[in-house]
Amino acid sequence: MRVLGFGTYDTQRHPRVGVLLDGMRALGLDVTELVHPLGLTTAERVRILQQPWRVPSLVVRLVTRWARLVAGAAGQRPEVVLVGYMGHFDVLLARGVFPRSTIVLDHLVFAAGTATDRGTRPGLRTWLLSLLDRAAIAAADVIVVDTEEHGELVPDRRRKDTVVAPVGAPLEWFAAGAAARTGLTGRDGTSPLTVVFYGLFTPLQGTPVIGRALRLLHERGVAVRTTLVGDGQDAAEVRAELEGFSEVHWRAWVGPDELPALVAEHDVCLGVFGDEGKALRVVPNKVYQGAAAGAAIVTSDTAPQRRVLDGCAVLVTPGDPAALADALADLAGDAEALAAWRSRAAGLAGRAFTPAAVAAPVVDALRTRPNRRAGAR
């Protein structure tokens, strides 16, 4: 089966589609890529959609990349075209350029839901973004989502064409975890617990909950050293909560080449702690990546995270700083329990979060699906 990764995605910023493609290669598919990255983060894309006067700049950038994609597509006859993350527009192009190929849309993000999470009030803009979501889904033959909850947002008539595949982690995260475990002797119960969080400080991540939990630990005198990586919507509130705390280290950002090793150096990787909307439907990248890196995972107790993490992570009540503080305090005071949670997370990642494991349900769906290209060879 010939598979073409196609679009304006950037695996350095959003590694999910790279995980799928690597998994397809590992499962024996013939995978190539035709990619011209748009060069915008998710936050920048959402900002453009929230501020209509910025749309012309998006159009110019998109048309330039599309022209290159169309030129590069000449003569290519893939059986399957995989359109990567944030491919709402790219999938429309793919449908036109490859009318006889099976088009797979990696639909991790619903545009309307993401805009709402980033502060856009329901109205004309979210309605238009919902139309964009529906148009993207209509253009695809197979829709890939990351949780059953996101699958329920797909229109009923397209549920049969929807595949649930976890986000997973790139291979470099597993390599970082293996390297960190080499010669690891474990905590002796006297050194402080080390905790890391990285992200864009959006409401679904619930970072104010993290800030208040760290303040509670500080007030209790529990030794926890925390690295907070990133910036964004709620960062100012968290900074104000933790102002002057020497045990909290801030980093504006860490590049994708450095981030896996940084996370692997910590005992605990924090997930998300929002308590409404999208926060209750996702299993975030950092949960998969942190587990692959060998960190213990502490995240919110939601249906999708409970299902995916399967007893291999410490789950706390969403939106509850005291519950998060209690969980971290328990880990700080019990080196054996910490080691056990780290081992469980790494074991689960090795079984279920590798590229091959993530891509398997997608490949199974493709192999049982009639080929659009009649007689393709």
Image (cartoon, rainbow, N blue to C red):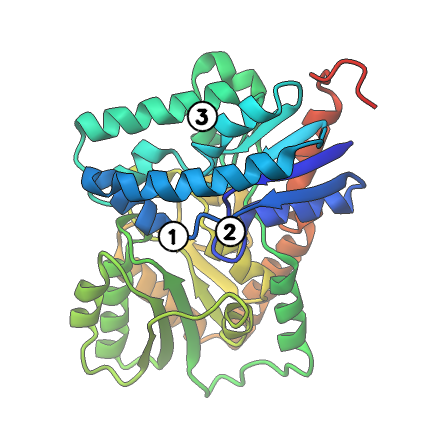
One can see residue 211 in this view: yes
For numbered disc 2, what is the local secondary structure?
loop
Q: Are the two marked residues, 2 and 1, in contact with CB atoms closer than 8 angstroms? A: no
Residue placed furthest toward the bottom = 190
Quadrant in which the C terminus is drawn: top right
- The spot of residue 228 in percent (x, y) is 35, 70
Residue 80 in which image quadrant: top right
Residue that numbered label 1 is attached to: 41
Q: How far apart are marks 1 and 3 (CA)?
A: 19 Å
- Left or right side of 351 for 151: left
**How busy is the neighbourhood of tag 1: few (under 14 within 10 Å), some, or many (20 plus)?**
some
Q: Distance between the residues labelled 2 and 1?
A: 9 Å
Residue 232 in which image quadrant: bottom left
Residue that numbered label 2 is attached to: 10
Q: Which residue is drawn at 30% across and 32% down?
A: 112
Residue that numbered label 3 is attached to: 136
Kind of residue indicated by mark 1: Thr
Compare marks 2 and 3 and give the one earlier in the sequence: 2
- The spot of residue 208 in percent (x, y) is 23, 60
Kind of residue indicated by mark 2: Asp
Kind of residue indicated by mark 3: Ala
For numbered disc 3, what is the local secondary structure?
helix
Residue 139 shows which numbered tag? Answer: none
- Left or right side of 334 for 98: right
